[in-house]
Image (tube, rainbow, N blue to C red):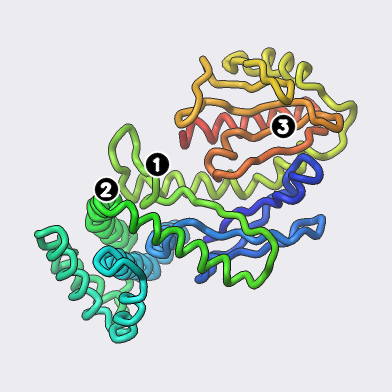
Amino acid sequence: MRLTLSCMQCLQENGRPGGASQIEVRDDGCYIATCLSGHKTVTVLQQHKFEVLFEIGAHAILDGYYREAVSSFTSSLERFYEYTIRIFLEKSSGSDDLFQAAWKNVSNMSERQLGAFIFLWANHFKETPLLLPTGLITFRNEVIHKGKIPSREEALKYGDAVLDVLRPKIKKINETLPEQVQSSSFRQIMASAKKAGTSQGVGTMSINAILGQGSSIEGQEKRLEDHLVLVDDMRIRLGNLQEYFNQMQAPQGPIMSPDEIRDFLARKFPELVAVEHNDPDGWAFFLGPAQQEPSSNCIVRAVQHSQGGTQFELSVSSRLERTEKMVMFCGNEDALRQVVDAQLRIYRDHL
């Protein structure tokens, strides 16, 4: 599993990010990359470890590593127990100190961690928490401790069962303990940023995780199989993102103005609706009547740059990656057509 990072210093200096960097997931959640211009970027992932671990499991299934997927789903569940225990203790004590002192005694004992979770949950919510069925616990132990090699179907079934355990609990905690949830997220970001060991600015990013926001389809929570389809397609799209940047930035003749881009898109993509954009001047292109956030249907934007030239935003990719994907457009009509077509496909597949 890899994350896609863009250089925001290039955006500030040149009006465009310095391409996309593919970086492997790290345990500390802190990512350092250097763009082609030599700028060092420090980025912290906002997702909690249990969310990241579940995504790693999803990617493992796509790559055919079903045993590793079961292991990652299991680790995700265990780290959620830790996350929840920490929130409960912060709620009762008013700080994170009690958790830090108590966790040392059980940090290497998963069964005791599970017991602590069960009783703290029961004490706070006056109910016993739903856990994995006994049959799947046996299956998990056979995979992790006895070397069982599961099938794809078994890995999917186990992943869905973990989702069924996690989702209602995440929702309940978010609704009833919002201050502690926010504090936990802030504490994680600060701890990860500290790992960078630098005084330069640190950015944050979020991934489109199945346990995160926006993980539902038409009001229903999607199953793991549905998520795998989206992840697989997204890996292909993001893998080609650097190529799209190169196409847009490669000098290939006279630079098209925002108005020329509008005229071209009106001919080649009549389904797009051009809406005039001010400050900076240009055009935003929507798939049908314009809708704004959080359900925006903006596909691309073309605006004048303050120092000349045309800036072009990949609006769909920007929303999916939650970071602005803006380039200085120097390509020809063919490059423009390819990029807009790619953004439309991503929008129709994912949003």
What kind of element bears circle 3?
strand
Q: Marks 2 and 3: CB-CB under 8 Å? A: no
Q: Depth check: give the residue in front, 277 or 216.
A: 277
Marks 2 and 3, the one that precedes in the sequence: 2
Query: Residue flagged by tag 1: what amino acid is it?
Result: Gly
Above or below for 176 versus 31: above
What kind of element bears circle 2?
helix
- The total of numbered circles placed on residues is 3
Q: Marks 3 and 1: CB-CB under 8 Å? A: no
Q: Left of 281 or right of it: where is 99?
A: left
Query: Residue flagged by tag 2: what amino acid is it?
Result: Glu
Q: Marks 2 and 1: CB-CB under 8 Å? A: no
* Crowd rating for badge 2 (residues with CA inside 10 Å; few <14, some 14–19, many 20+): few
Q: Depth check: give the residue in front, 71 or 33.
A: 33
Instruction: Identify the residue under disc 1.
Output: 214
Q: Left of 131 or right of it: where is 32?
A: right
